[in-house]
């Protein structure tokens, strides 16, 4: 998977991963729903320096979507590209659906499942967490930011 590539819907923004993704999971938070227009989004993580924009850097918009992070998107077509959390400054979460081969990465959990839309019940057997996972990297003990 190292060297995997992806892009936005219009192809203006293209990126490459320089390492294997990890912490892949579904997010059902209200911000993901509003940002994507879908009931949930799948994100995966790589070290920040291993997410390389190959074209379209000047077309990437930024939106502070919560108290703990910001989203980046293609300003031409609106495709959600990444989520950057303040408590994980060395990594970046990217939207798996933007990979040229999204089937190459498989989700392993659900977060913010307590915010899911009732008619969008997951049909898998993956672990479900009402907020962040208890072992989420970088969260101070006992602190769970609101999404």
Image: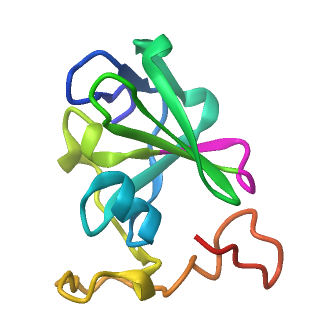
Residue 104 is left or right of residue 136, and the answer is: left
Q: Residue at x 40, y 65 (%)?
A: 25
Which of 123/145 is in front?
Answer: 145
In-image side of 125 versus 56 (left or right): left
Which residue shows up at 41% across the image and 54% down it? 43
Q: Is residue 127 left or right of residue 38?
A: right
Question: Left of 7 or right of it: where is 100?
Answer: left
Does the segment drawn in magenta span residue 75? no
In the image, what residue occupies the spot 38% across and 72% down? Answer: 28
Question: Whole-percent x and y of residue 76?
Answer: 31, 22
On screen, residue 93 above or below 9: below
Q: Residue furthest right?
A: 141
- Residue 9 image point, x, y percent: 21, 30
Q: Name the dominant secondary structure of the magenta segment.
A: loop
Which picture quadrant has residue 146? bottom right
Numbered-mark total: 0
| Residue 71 point in image, percent of width and height | 52, 44
Q: Residue at x 39, y 25 (%)?
A: 75
Residue 126, position in %: x, y?
32, 82
Q: How is the image coloured?
A: rainbow
Q: Nearer the viewer, residue 37 or 138?
A: 37
In which quadrant of the rendered image does the N terminus lie? top left
Range drawn in magenta: 86-93
Quadrant for the C terminus in the image: bottom right
* Residue nearest the observer in this picture, 110 or 72: 72
């Amino acid at each position: 998977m190292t060297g995997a590539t992806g892009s936005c819907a219009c192809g203006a923004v293209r990126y490459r991963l320089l390492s294997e993704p990890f912490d892949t999971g579904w997010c059902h938070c209200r911000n993901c729903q509003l940002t994507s227009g879908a009931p949930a989004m799948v994100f995966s993580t790589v070290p920040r320096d291993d997410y390389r924009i190959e074209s379209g850097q000047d077309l990437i918009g930024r939106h502070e979507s919560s108290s703990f992070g910001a989203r980046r998107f293609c300003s031409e077509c609106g495709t959600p590209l990444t989520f950057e959390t303040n408590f994980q400054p060395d990594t970046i979460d990217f939207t798996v659906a933007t990979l040229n081969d999204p089937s190459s990465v498989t989700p392993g959990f659900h977060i913010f499942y307590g915010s899911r839309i009732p008619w969008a019940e997951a049909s898998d057997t993956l672990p479900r967490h009402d907020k962040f996972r208890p072992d989420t990297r970088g969260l101070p003990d006992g602190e769970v930011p609101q999404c």
